[in-house]
Image (spheres, rainbow, N blue to C red):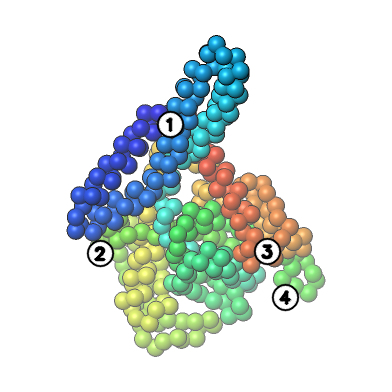
């Protein structure tokens, strides 16, 4: 491990040198500064670790002295230093684990009503509000790209962006099927119904990363429509894009111009294609590693919201919270996301140590 740590220190020194020589190349300076900023916490810990290793060597020498009192004191200090070294090594291993390259990206979220009719649509709207409130807690910015309402306060589908530091690193664990168990307002017999909503979390993609040939796209335009089919505009501003090779269809109608809707639809399409490519690479690299934690499988039932018992259970980490209201207003959602992050880090660390 020491060789890896020394290589990181050398890279950090090289970055300082290159920053000093960057001159007026602002893009290069920005790229180098970001890499340096990302490495700095790790470098500080490495330097501390190397200092402790040096102290251990010096203290071991003192334990061999003829002065019994000094030797005993050195033995006690050596024990403390070895404990500190072990803790630092553990922390360094965690920091050395390769991060998900998408973690620093903004997010495109898609929420769709699944089985359960109107009740599924109402729960889709509940989840949408939950994520908006959760984003507010982290001061992330949200913007609706496309929304299809049911007319009774529910949603057939909503696509929106979440922009802010760490958005994807936390929200990526929300991909999958969310199941709700509750008595619908329209249920006169008091029977509990089960409905589902699917959530997809996509990393926003830069234009330079995904290029889509015009020949691969079929674009249709139509009139924007609101709940119940009411026309929002008389002009043909809504856009539906079909990616011919994959059959993926994306529609956007919330903007007032056809060009803006086209650009938004393309950004969603690129994010979906990027996600498909990422999943393919993950599968090729190590199929066994793709556990239920954060795998983002759309067919995966990840969480159940049981309203009669005020209980929310995440099936991936087998954790329940009896603060359903807190989860639904976003304040208690981290109960699950924090545990999922820890589980994901532990799995990545185990994979890293196995292949180190």
Q: Nearer the viewer, mark 3 or mark 1?
A: 1
Give the x, y percent position of residue 175.
53, 55
Q: CA distance from mark 3 to mark 1?
A: 45 Å
Residue placed under numbered mark 2 in the picture: 214
- Upstream in the sequence, badge 4 or badge 1? 1
Residue found at x 54% / y 17%: 63
Q: Is residue 340 left or right of residue 256?
A: right
Point out the residue furthest to the bottom here.
Answer: 234
* Occupied quadrant, residue 272: bottom left
Q: CA distance from mark 3 to mark 4?
A: 25 Å
Few, some or many residues within 10 Å of mark 4 (<14, 14–19, 20+): few
Residue placed under numbered mark 4 in the picture: 186
> Is residue 298 shown to the viewer in this render?
no
Residue placed under numbered mark 1 in the picture: 50
Q: CA distance from mark 2 to mark 3?
A: 46 Å
| Residue closest to the eye, 244 or 150 | 150
Q: Are marks 3 and 1 in contact (CB under 8 Å)?
A: no
Give the x, y percent position of residue 224.
42, 81
């Amino acid at each position: 491990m020491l060789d890896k740590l020394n290589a990181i220190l050398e890279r950090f020194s090289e970055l300082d040198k290159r920053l000093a020589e960057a001159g007026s190349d602002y893009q290069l300076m920005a790229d180098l500064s970001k890499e340096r900023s990302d490495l700095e916490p790790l470098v500080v810990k490495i330097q501390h670790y190397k200092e402790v290793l040096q102290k251990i060597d010096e203290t071991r020498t003192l334990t061999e002295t003829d002065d019994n009192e000094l030797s005993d004191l050195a033995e006690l200090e050596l024990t403390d230093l070895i404990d500190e070294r072990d803790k630092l090594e553990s922390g360094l291993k965690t920091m050395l684990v390769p991060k998900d390259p998408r973690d620093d990206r903004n997010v495109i979220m898609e929420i769709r009503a699944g089985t359960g009719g109107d009740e599924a649509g109402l729960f889709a709207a509940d989840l949408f509000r939950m994520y908006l409130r959760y984003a507010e807690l982290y001061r992330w910015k949200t913007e609706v790209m496309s929304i299809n309402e049911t007319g009774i306060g529910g949603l057939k589908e909503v696509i929106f962006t979440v922009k802010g530091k760490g958005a994807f690193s936390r929200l990526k664990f929300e991909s999958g099927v969310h199941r709700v168990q509750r008595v619908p307002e329209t249920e006169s017999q008091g029977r509990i119904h089960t409905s589902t909503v699917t959530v997809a979390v996509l990393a926003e993609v830069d234009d330079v990363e995904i290029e889509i040939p015009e020949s691969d796209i079929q674009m249709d335009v139509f009139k924007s429509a609101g709940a119940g089919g009411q026309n929002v505009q008389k002009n043909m501003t809504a856009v539906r894009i079909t990616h011919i090779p994959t059959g993926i269809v994306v529609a956007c109608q919330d903007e007032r111009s056809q060009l803006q809707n086209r650009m938004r639809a393309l950004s969603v399409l690129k994010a979906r294609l990027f996600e498909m490519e990422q999943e393919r690479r993950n599968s090729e690299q190590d199929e066994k590693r793709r556990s239920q934690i954060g795998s983002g499988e759309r067919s995966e039932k990840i969480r159940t919201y049981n309203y009669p018992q005020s209980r929310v259970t995440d099936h991936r980490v087998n954790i329940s919270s009896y603060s359903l209201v807190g989860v639904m207003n976003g304040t208690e959602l981290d109960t699950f996301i924090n545990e999922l992050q820890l589980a994901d880090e532990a799995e990545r660390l185990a994979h890293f140590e196995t292949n180190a």
